[in-house]
Image: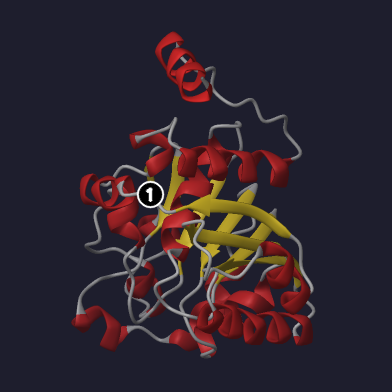
C-alpha cells in the first residue's frame, strides 16, 4: 500500500478538488484507489465525488457505530470513505481513533487522505500514518506561508514530501513564480493546475472534472500528475481538426 496525505495548511486552496480528481485519474490507470475524507470538522469530499454523505461514514466508525467496511463505498472507479456532514455525527466522532482507522486501510493499493486545513490533530495523524505528502498551494503568499508550516511538520514526522501542486493558477503578474515556491518549500513543483470555471459545475453534479470536462487544461494537468506519480506514460488528447485550424488562424 502507498498512502499519501494531501495537505495545504490554508483552507480554500482547492485541496479536496485536487484529491478527488487525482484519485479518479489514478484509478483510470488501473490502480485500486481509496480516498479518505479526514476533515473531521468540515467534511465535504462526498460532494466532489457524488457519494451519499449519510451514515455509515468515517464519523460513525470513529464513534464505534459502524465497521470500516460498512462505511466504504464506490464512485467513479474509486473507493471512498466519506465523512459525515451533520453536526450530530461530528459530536459523536472520536478523533483519537483516526490512527487506528488509517492503520486498517492496508488492503488498498493506493490510499489518498484528504487532510483538513490547519495543523490540528487530524492533520498530524494523517501525516504521521502516511508514507508521503503532497502540498496543494495557491501561488500567493498566505497559501505559501501555510504550506511551508505543513512542510516543516511533515519533515519532523519523517513523512516524505513528494512535492507541491500549484492549484488555481491564473498566470497573472502578482502570482508567485514556481521557482520561488520551490525555493521556499524546498520541494519540486509537480504540477500547475490552472483556474477552471468548470470545477464549480462538476462539484454540483458530483462528477470530478477529469470526467466532467476531461479535455480541459485543468483536468489534463491532474491526469499528467497522476501519470507522473504512478510512473506511467502520459498521453495528452489529440486536438480536433477544428482546434488545430483555430490555433493555425491565431498564429497568422
Q: Which residue reaches farthest top?
A: 241
* Residue nearer the viewer, 57 or 150: 150
Query: Residue drawn 43% across and 32% down?
Result: 214
How far across and how far down the image is residue 232, in percent?
Answer: 72, 33
Query: Residue drawn 54% across and 68% down?
Result: 175
How far across and how far down the image is residue 42, in percent?
Answer: 33, 77
How far across and how far down the image is residue 115, in percent?
Answer: 51, 72
How far across and how far down the image is residue 133, in percent?
Answer: 67, 67
124 to the left or right of 249: right
Q: How many marks?
A: 1
Give residue 246's quadrant in the image: top left
Give residue 95's quadrant in the image: bottom left
* Residue nearer the viewer, 26 or 162: 162
With respect to residue 235, does 116 lie above or below?
below
Query: Residue drawn 53% across and 81% down?
Result: 9
Label 1 sits on residue:
196
71 to the left or right of 185: left
Q: Is residue 107 visible?
A: no
108 to the left or right of 72: right
Q: Is residue 194 visible?
A: yes
Amino acid at each position: 500500500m502507498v498512502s499519501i496525505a494531501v495537505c495545504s495548511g490554508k483552507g480554500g486552496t482547492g485541496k479536496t478538488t485536487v484529491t478527488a480528481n487525482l484519485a479518479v485519474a489514478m484509478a483510470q490507470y488501473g490502480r485500486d484507489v481509496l480516498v479518505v475524507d479526514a476533515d473531521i470538522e468540515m467534511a465535504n469530499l462526498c460532494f466532489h465525488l457524488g457519494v451519499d454523505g449519510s451514515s455509515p461514514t468515517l464519523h460513525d466508525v470513529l464513534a464505534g457505530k459502524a465497521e470500516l467496511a460498512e462505511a466504504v463505498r464506490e464512485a467513479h472507479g474509486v473507493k471512498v470513505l466519506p465523512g459525515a456532514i451533520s453536526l450530530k455525527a461530528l459530536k459523536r466522532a472520536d478523533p483519537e481513533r483516526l490512527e487506528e482507522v488509517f492503520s486498517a486501510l492496508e488492503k488498498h493499493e493506493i490510499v489518498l487522505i484528504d487532510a483538513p486545513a490547519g495543523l490540528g490533530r487530524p492533520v498530524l495523524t494523517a501525516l504521521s500514518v502516511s508514507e508521503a505528502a503532497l502540498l496543494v498551494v495557491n501561488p500567493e503568499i498566505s497559501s505559501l506561508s501555510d504550506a511551508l508550516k505543513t512542510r516543516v511538520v511533515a519533515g519532523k514526522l519523517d513523512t516524505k514530501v513528494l512535492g507541491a501542486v500549484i492549484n488555481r493558477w491564473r498566470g497573472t503578474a502578482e502570482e508567485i513564480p514556481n521557482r520561488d515556491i520551490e525555493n521556499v518549500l524546498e520541494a519540486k513543483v509537480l504540477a500547475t493546475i490552472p483556474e477552471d470555471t468548470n470545477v464549480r459545475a462538476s462539484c454540483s453534479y458530483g462528477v470530478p472534472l477529469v470526467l466532467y470536462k476531461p479535455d480541459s487544461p485543468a483536468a489534463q494537468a491532474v491526469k499528467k500528475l497522476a501519470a507522473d506519480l504512478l510512473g506511467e506514460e502520459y498521453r495528452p488528447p489529440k486536438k480536433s481538426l477544428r482546434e488545430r485550424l483555430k490555433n493555425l488562424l491565431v498564429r497568422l
